Amino acid sequence: MCSAFCFMFFSFTLLFSLFSLLIFVLRLKLWCNCEICQAFLTSSWTKDFDNLCDWYTHLLKKSPTGTIHIHVLGNIITANPENVEHILKTRFENYPKGKPFSALLGDLLGRGIFNVDGDSWKFQRKMASLELGSISIRMHAYDIVKSEIQSRLIPLLSSVAGKDHVLDLQDVLRRFSFDNICKFSFGLDPGCLKLSLPVSEFAEAFDLASKLSAQRGLAPSPLIWKVKRLLNLGTEKQLKEAIKMVDEFAQEMINQRREKGFSDGNDLLSRFMGTINDDKYLRDIVISFLLAGRDTVASGLTSFFWLLSQHPEVESAIRDELERVMGSSDEQFASFDQMREMHYLHAALYESLRLFPPVQFDSKFAQEDDILPDCTLVRKGTRVTYHPYAMGRMDRIWSSDCLEYKPERWLKNGRYIPENPYKYPVFQAGLRVCLGKEMALVEMKCVVLAIIRRFNIRLADPNQAPRFAPGLTATVRGGLPILVQERGA
């Protein structure tokens, strides 16, 4: 009797959900037959563009205001710096992450800082600001990066140098940053960058959970993934299994810390455990930092080395600056002070991030009706997205040479000059500006200097152009296959 009732209940739920979805889609197509929405619904944009972000860039360039509306998604997308400042600063309280966004990532990030608003966000923000701003934790992060470079990254590249062995640099950098962020967040070394390049079940589960969580946002309606989650079908079943493994790993780390004591630990988990007793909340906070610190750094470095392979003159200029600042020193790594003197390197990284931001777009949801500075009407509940990837390719923002990789645009008399953060929201801006920005830049600089000082990196296919896979951060489809040659060999 019970089995029959359950069968009838789930059958009714499935049929009702499918019927509701059908009505929803039909209403969308009848309601909006504009060219943009039809191109999105039929995927006809793929005839002319490899990447969705490039299609959006094309549309935003054509728009007189730098703003478009994808009606079928209920999404206003903008590449207008004045709008960005309005969203991230002037009317910050009106543009929270919002419940629709939190639902997408809720199973993975829970109540972590990147998935909450209000008091919970303010509490985590204040706590993270105190921790990440301390000299001791920045030195701890710096030591972790140096150790990973010296003991793993350099030996790995040396092992394949000059052997016509093709190495996926994106995979190497993802392993590198995963080792670093796990040591920094949990005090655990997963060993992903050992010479054998071992498979890490936790890393694979974390990657899959991130990927499938992001794919929820590509569905025409949230009803689709919610029904699949209810019935434990397809990608939602995979996501549930991946998150279970992530949860088990995080809980194991928390239990170990409680047993061994955490008062003397330098990792984030140990530091947060001093003020938080809720294990689930601890898990959510640390997993959020794991997501932010791993994928963004690897993505930024992958794009940087692709650009460097296309611009050997930039590589030469960085080497000249390195030799000028460090001289004939036997030190393997530049100090903080020495890196601050490397204005060209800083400019080269900022220019790379302008063209290839790790987070290509970011969305908020309007709490109340509003009007953007370009006179775009925003209705309550509308998704509003600013698009750093498109902004870096707008000639009205960066002039007619915006598609060129020119570190010099950031320099004046040889010194780096910052830009308006709302013109360049790669690290967000306003109250939600990235707290880990400086630490991420130091990590990237350490990697760049260590590699170009010892090796020549060349693409296996010089004609390869980045094609991005859907995800929370920009990931190149097929990776970045390279050949490594030791300098002077």
Image: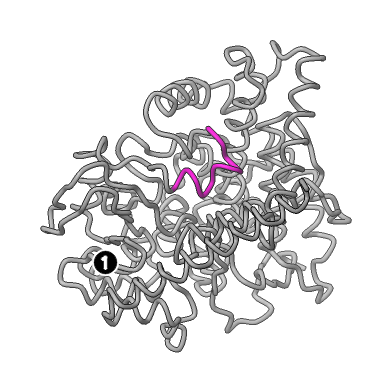
State which quadrant residue 244 falls in. top right
Q: Is residue 46 above or below residue 129?
A: below
Residue at the far bottom in the pictured view? 47
Kind of residue sitting beneath label 1: His
The image shows residue 296 at horizontal and vertical percentages of: 54, 50
Numbered disc 1: secondary structure: strand
Indicate left or right for 118 with 482 as reference. left
Residue 273 location, quadrant: top right
Q: Residue at x 66, y 61 (%)?
A: 235
The residue shown at (71%, 64%) is 487
Look at mark 1 in the image and give the residue it sits on. 69
Tell me which secondary structure the magenta stretch mostly adopts: helix
Coordinates of residue 10 in the picture (x, y in percent): 65, 55
Front-most of residues 366 and 358: 366
Residue 107 lies within the magenta run: yes
Residue nearest the observer in this picture, 221 or 354: 221
Q: Is residue 192 above or below residue 180?
A: below
Q: Quadrant of the C terminus?
A: bottom right
Q: Is residue 389 left or right of residue 115?
A: left
Task: Specify whether residue 132 is painted magenta.
Answer: no
Badge 1 crowding class, 10 Å Cα cut-off, few under 14, some 14 to 19, many 20 or more, is: some
Type of colouring: one colour
The residues colored magenta run 101-111
Asked whether, in this view, residue 372 is left or right of residue 366, the answer is left
Q: Position of residue 112 (x, y in %)?
A: 53, 33
* Residue 194 shows in this picture: yes
Point out residue 434 in the picture as x, y percentages from the top left corner: 43, 39
Residue 262 drawn above or below residue 45: above
In the depicted view, which residue is nearer to us: 41 or 483? 41
The residue at the far right in this view is: 196
Res. 173 in view: no
